[in-house]
Amino acid sequence: MLSYQHIYHAGNAADLHKHALLAWALDYLTAKDKPLSYLETHAGRGLYDLSSAEARKTAEADAGLGRAERGAWLDEDHPLMRALASVRRQHGDHAYPGSPLIAQHFLRRGDSAHLAEMHPAEHAALAQVAGRAKLYSQDGFQMARTITPPTPRRGLMLVDPSYEVKTDYTEIPGFFQDIARKWNVGTLALWYPILTDDRQRGMVARLSQAFPEALKSEVHFPPAKPGHGMVGSGMFVVNPPWGLAEEAARIEALFRG
């Protein structure tokens, strides 16, 4: 559980899908003059250097962010590209924001952020860039159970585990139901991999049964290398902001093209 480091995968096709929708949702939610809470259960280090040896070892960003930039998928006013430009102005041309820094770009002074990360090195790196966010060096699922409903009650939670713990697939549907009962106004967003062995299918089916009105967005792409098990990315969003379904459909069409 503590071996995963996202630097090897930062900016890949799954990040592009996930972060485009996250940034759009946060941009929409912060357009209203009402405070909100942002929760993240598996935050990572928050800031990535795509020129680092780790990132270049896999070069996964070439097929994600790189593909989008070459194809002009997102114009400069898209929320993700605005967040990316802001981070690069501060940290250099090869910087890539993880979801905590994407959220930081949109959150305002009256908003709150709660970020959980158990990996000691990732947590230490996150502390350097997290700003006013409250950090938790503990299991993110437990953090969410403890602080929901948050103050302010309006807000969004991102659940983005590495799925190295195989029980995540069986336990997440129940976790989402528990959080939704406690925090029925919250937007709950789950990222999941689409795998060649389809192990995610049962989890998604249970979530869809529990939350029939939720948004499910899936994109497919070639494996990062021959034999790699991940061939797509999914986002399941309970209480999606108005308009997110249309943005998701637009992003999905870009991947198909």
Image: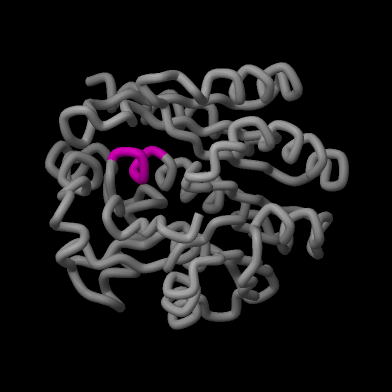
Nearest to the observer: residue 168 or residue 249: 168
Examine the image and state in which quarter residue 118 appears. Answer: bottom right
Examine the image and state in which quarter residue 45 appears. Answer: bottom left
Question: Quick check: 199 above or below 183?
Answer: above
Residue 63 lies, in percent from the top left, at 18, 39
The residue depicted at 27 percent of the width and 74 percent of the height is 89
Residue furthest right as drawn: 182
Total count of labels: 0
Colour scheme in the image? one colour
Does the stretch in magenta take in 15?
yes
The residue depicted at 66 percent of the width and 37 percent of the height is 172
The residue depicted at 36 percent of the width and 28 percent of the height is 232
Residue 27 lies, in percent from the top left, at 52, 52
The residue depicted at 47 percent of the width and 50 percent of the height is 23
69 left or right of 134 in image:
left
16 left or right of 215 in image:
left
Examine the image and state in which quarter residue 87 appears. Answer: bottom left
Q: Quadrant of the C terminus?
A: top left
- Report the span colored magenta: 13-17
Nearest to the observer: residue 37 or residue 118: 118
Residue 122 lies, in percent from the top left, at 44, 70
Residue 177 lies, in percent from the top left, at 79, 35
39 left or right of 178 in image:
left
Does the stretch in magenta take in 156?
no
171 left or right of 117 in image:
right
Q: Main secondary structure of the magenta part?
A: helix
Question: Quick check: 159 above or below 223?
Answer: below
